[in-house]
Amino acid sequence: MLLLENFVALFMESAPWLMLGLTVAAVIKVLVPSQLLAKHLGDSGPGATVKAALFGAPLPLCSCGVIPAALGLRRSGASKAATTSFLISTPETGVDSISISYALLGPFMAIIRPIAAITSAITAGILVGKENSIPASASAQPAGTCCASNTPEPEPCCSTEQPAVKQSTAADKLLAGLRFTYIDLVRDIALWLVIGLGFAAIIKTYVPNEFLLQWGDGLLAFVVMALVGVPMYICATASTPIAAGLLFSGVSPGATLVFMLVGPATNIATMGLVKTELGNRTLAIYLLSVVVVGFAFGYLTNYLAALWDMDFLAQAQQAHEMVNTPLTYGASILLAGLMVYGLANKYTGIRN
């Protein structure tokens, strides 16, 4: 019974902020067309890398959704450096994960998490750009595609003439964005969100602080969190409840941050894409950047937490109290309904 109570409490604490994040994500989906991303990400220099990190950071894509998006960018002309930067910043953070981080972990973690994600993305992109200094114009299109430079004559897909497309109204675009976040995105993250909240509730209910405190707050704790995070196929939003359970059970804030950075950015599918599309060297740089920058920010987080004598539980409680009861209940009911609908569609094969 206590386990169920803790699960429900965590769900209700998360729901208003997650719904806020999903709504903002829908607006971003409408206002930031994918063509704009490809236009600015073709260069291998630091400028394109920074743009890719900043473009990807707020987007509502998890570790599964970022794969086709990144592949599309790469095939549309994005450089290896920009693609790598986008692949790291996008799943590590987002408007939805920032809002739920604020709700469950407090304002400090909600701020330092995206900063660390963007830093690791830029670091990896710059290193990849130096490693692969081929001009973007020579590698914008993969050899063998109809638009490759070695094609004798332009194929129809390269034609500048585009078929007439019916213009969508602002309302249509907004509805499409809301459908993407409230239906498609919720369907993708619902199961992992339930697992994350369940894991957090189990830790809160059954795991004594002494068990997790044995790892300390230094390098060993970071290594353990990285090893736990690397194989997990989980998005930034769903990893947050797990991180909250770890933090409030005694794991240091730095080690918790390492888990939130490494988990969403590293999984078999993403690493397979990086290896296939960008090469083994890029994969090595990718993993090294995520882990090393994650560790660096882990140490920084622990240092600042000790310096400023932070009470993360009090910070999170203050965030919880900002949400009034009617809003909490309404958001919880709406989110639960969307999750049930999404899971039903996902596992019955229905797509409306």
Image (spheres, helix red, strand yellow):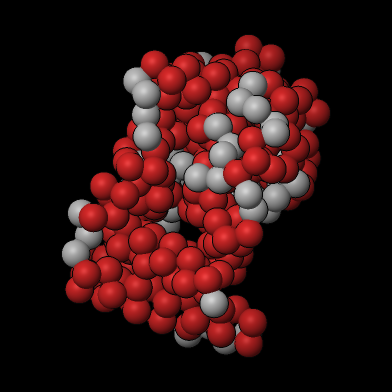
Is 178 in front, or is 298? 298
Q: Is residue 41 left or right of residue 18?
A: right
Residue 137 lies in what quarter of the image?
top right
Q: Is residue 107 left or right of residue 73?
A: left
Q: Position of residue 63 (x, y in %)?
A: 60, 50
Please say if 31 is above or below 77. below
Please say if 67 is above or below 5. above
Asked if one can make out residue 98 in the rendered structure from this viewpoint, the answer is no
The mark tally for this picture is 0
Is 334 in front, or is 252? 252
Please say if 96 is above or below 217. below
Q: Position of residue 155 (x, y in %)?
A: 61, 50
Asked if one can make out residue 288 in the rendered structure from this viewpoint, the answer is yes
Residue 120 lies in what quarter of the image?
top right
Is 155 in front, or is 49? 49
Residue 346 lies in what quarter of the image?
bottom right
Q: Position of residue 69 (x, y in %)?
A: 55, 50
Q: Residue at x 63, y 12 (%)?
A: 130
Q: Residue at x 48, y 66 (%)?
A: 6
The N terminus sits in image quarter: bottom right
Q: Residue at x 22, y 60 (%)?
A: 323
Please say if 178 is above or below 207. below
Q: Position of residue 182 (x, y in %)?
A: 39, 70
Q: Residue at x 37, y 29 (%)?
A: 310
